[in-house]
Image: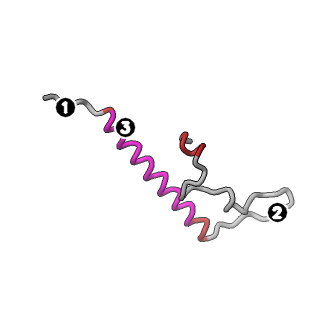
Amino acid sequence: MLLAEIYDKSVPGFNDAQQDHTIPKISDLRKTRLTLAHINSLRMMNDVRKYEEEKRMADVQRQYKPKATA
């Protein structure tokens, strides 16, 4: 978890607890089923995380690359 995720809860593409209607209760006997909307939101979350990881790695490479010799 990143520090920005703690303060900014409404990051688009990430899981939102208000959208999650599948919180199991003791009285539930059936398994939850994935819908196409669930699968699409999971794909979007994965795409956002992948993009952020690539951006973070580019920043790390830029910070730690060796200095150019003149």
How many numbered discs?
3
Is residue 70 in the magenta section?
A: no
Of all residues shown, which one is farthest toward the left? 70
| Residue extent of the magenta highlight | 40-63
The image shows residue 33, relative to residue 7, as above or below, that is below
Residue type at the position of mark 1: Ala
Q: Position of residue 29 (x, y in %)?
A: 82, 63
In the picture, measured across the screen, residue 64 lies left or right of residue 24, that is: left
Q: Which residue is mark 2?
A: 29
Q: Which residue is mark 3?
A: 60
Q: Which mark is residue 68?
A: 1
Earlier-in-chain disc, 3 versus 2: 2
Residue at the spot 49% in from the left edge and 51% down from the top edge: 49
Q: Position of residue 48 (x, y in %)?
A: 48, 55
Residue type at the position of mark 3: Val
Residue type at the position of mark 2: Leu
Q: Relative to the observer, which residue lies in front, 69 or 8?
A: 8
Visual colour scheme? secondary structure
